[in-house]
Protein backbone atom coordinates (compact mmCIF):
# COMPACT_ATOMS: atom_id res chain seq x y z
CA UNK A 1 0.00 0.00 0.00
CA UNK A 2 1.27 3.43 -0.84
CA UNK A 3 1.45 6.31 1.59
CA UNK A 4 -1.30 8.91 1.34
CA UNK A 5 -0.69 11.90 -0.93
CA UNK A 6 -2.20 15.22 0.14
CA UNK A 7 -3.76 17.54 -2.44
CA UNK A 8 -5.51 20.86 -1.95
CA UNK A 9 -8.83 21.99 -3.40
CA UNK A 10 -10.97 25.08 -3.23
CA UNK A 11 -14.52 24.03 -2.32
CA UNK A 12 -17.16 26.74 -2.24
CA UNK A 13 -14.43 29.35 -1.82
CA UNK A 14 -12.66 27.59 1.04
CA UNK A 15 -9.32 25.83 0.79
CA UNK A 16 -9.26 22.24 1.98
CA UNK A 17 -7.01 19.28 1.44
CA UNK A 18 -7.54 15.57 1.30
CA UNK A 19 -5.12 12.71 1.64
CA UNK A 20 -5.57 9.62 -0.50
CA UNK A 21 -3.33 6.77 -1.52
CA UNK A 22 -2.17 7.01 -5.14
CA UNK A 23 -4.53 4.26 -6.42
CA UNK A 24 -7.47 6.30 -5.10
CA UNK A 25 -6.19 9.45 -6.82
CA UNK A 26 -5.88 7.46 -10.05
CA UNK A 27 -9.42 6.07 -9.69
CA UNK A 28 -10.83 9.52 -8.86
CA UNK A 29 -9.18 10.99 -11.96
CA UNK A 30 -10.53 8.14 -14.11
CA UNK A 31 -14.05 8.58 -12.73
CA UNK A 32 -13.92 12.34 -13.30
CA UNK A 33 -12.85 11.81 -16.91
CA UNK A 34 -15.64 9.26 -17.48
CA UNK A 35 -18.16 11.72 -16.04
CA UNK A 36 -16.80 14.63 -18.10
CA UNK A 37 -15.80 16.62 -15.02
CA UNK A 38 -12.66 17.93 -13.45
CA UNK A 39 -11.33 16.19 -10.37
CA UNK A 40 -12.04 19.35 -8.37
CA UNK A 41 -15.66 19.44 -9.57
CA UNK A 42 -16.15 15.80 -8.62
CA UNK A 43 -14.63 16.35 -5.17
CA UNK A 44 -16.98 19.34 -4.71
CA UNK A 45 -19.99 17.13 -5.56
CA UNK A 46 -18.85 14.47 -3.10
CA UNK A 47 -18.33 17.15 -0.46
CA UNK A 48 -21.90 18.42 -0.91
CA UNK A 49 -23.40 15.00 -0.17
CA UNK A 50 -21.03 13.60 2.44
CA UNK A 51 -22.89 14.48 5.60
CA UNK A 52 -20.76 14.56 8.76
CA UNK A 53 -18.06 12.14 7.60
CA UNK A 54 -14.56 13.23 6.71
CA UNK A 55 -13.91 14.25 3.13
CA UNK A 56 -11.06 11.79 2.47
CA UNK A 57 -13.11 8.85 3.69
CA UNK A 58 -16.14 10.06 1.76
CA UNK A 59 -14.10 10.23 -1.43
CA UNK A 60 -12.83 6.68 -0.87
CA UNK A 61 -16.37 5.39 -0.30
CA UNK A 62 -17.66 7.26 -3.35
CA UNK A 63 -14.94 5.71 -5.52
CA UNK A 64 -15.79 2.23 -4.24
CA UNK A 65 -19.51 2.71 -4.92
CA UNK A 66 -18.86 4.26 -8.33
CA UNK A 67 -16.74 1.42 -9.64
CA UNK A 68 -18.96 -1.24 -8.08
CA UNK A 69 -22.00 0.23 -9.82
CA UNK A 70 -20.15 0.51 -13.14
CA UNK A 71 -19.04 -3.11 -12.85
CA UNK A 72 -22.58 -4.25 -12.08
CA UNK A 73 -23.95 -2.31 -15.07
CA UNK A 74 -21.29 -3.70 -17.39
CA UNK A 75 -21.78 -7.29 -16.29
CA UNK A 76 -25.60 -7.25 -16.27
CA UNK A 77 -26.95 -9.79 -18.75
CA UNK A 78 -30.52 -8.50 -18.95
CA UNK A 79 -31.85 -10.96 -16.40
CA UNK A 80 -31.68 -13.95 -18.72
CA UNK A 81 -31.59 -17.25 -16.87
CA UNK A 82 -30.80 -19.63 -19.72
Image (cartoon, rainbow, N blue to C red):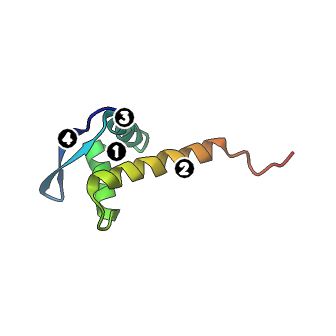
* Crowding at mark 4 (Cα within 10 Å: few <14, some 14-19, many 20+): few
The residue identified by callout 4 is 6
In space, the residues marked 4 and 3 are separated at their CA atoms by: 13 Å
CA distance for labels 2 and 4: 27 Å
Q: Residue at x 61, y 47 (%)?
A: 73
- Element type where label 4 sits in the image: strand
Q: Name the residue nearer the viewer: 11 or 35.
A: 11
Rendered-image quadrant of the C terminus = top right
Q: Residues within 10 Å of mark 2 (few under 14, many from 20)?
A: few
* Drawn side of residue 30 relative to residue 18, left or right: right
Task: Tell me if mark 1 has few (under 14), some (14-19) or many (20+) residues whose alpha carbon lies within 10 angstroms of its own.
Answer: few
Sooner in the amino-acid sequence: mark 4 or mark 3: 4
Spatial separation of the CA atoms under disc 1 and disc 3: 19 Å
**CB atoms of marks 2 and 3 within 8 Å:** no
Residue behind mark 3:
23
* Towards the viewer: 18 or 76: 18
User: Which comes before the other along the chain, label 2 or label 1?
Assistant: 1
Q: Earlier in the sequence, mark 2 or mark 4?
A: 4
Say which of marks 2 and 1 sits in front: 2
Q: Eyeballing the image, is 52 above or below 8?
A: below
Closer to us: mark 2 or mark 3? 3
Mark 1 or mark 4, earlier in chain? 4
- Residue 7 vs 62, above or below: the answer is above
Give the percent coordinates (x, y) of residue 68.
Answer: 53, 47
Q: Earlier in the sequence, mark 2 or mark 3?
A: 3
Return the residue at label 1.
Answer: 37
> Which dot marks residue 69?
2
Q: For numbered disc 1, what is the local secondary structure?
A: loop
Question: How far is the residue under mark 1 from the one under mark 4?
Answer: 20 Å
Q: Quadrant of residue 2?
A: top left
Which residue is most to the bottom?
52
User: Looking at the rendering, in which quadrant would you find the N terminus?
Assistant: top left
Amino acid sequence: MTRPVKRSFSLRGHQTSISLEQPFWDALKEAAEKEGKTTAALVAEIDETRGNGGLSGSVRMWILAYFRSRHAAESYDGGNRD
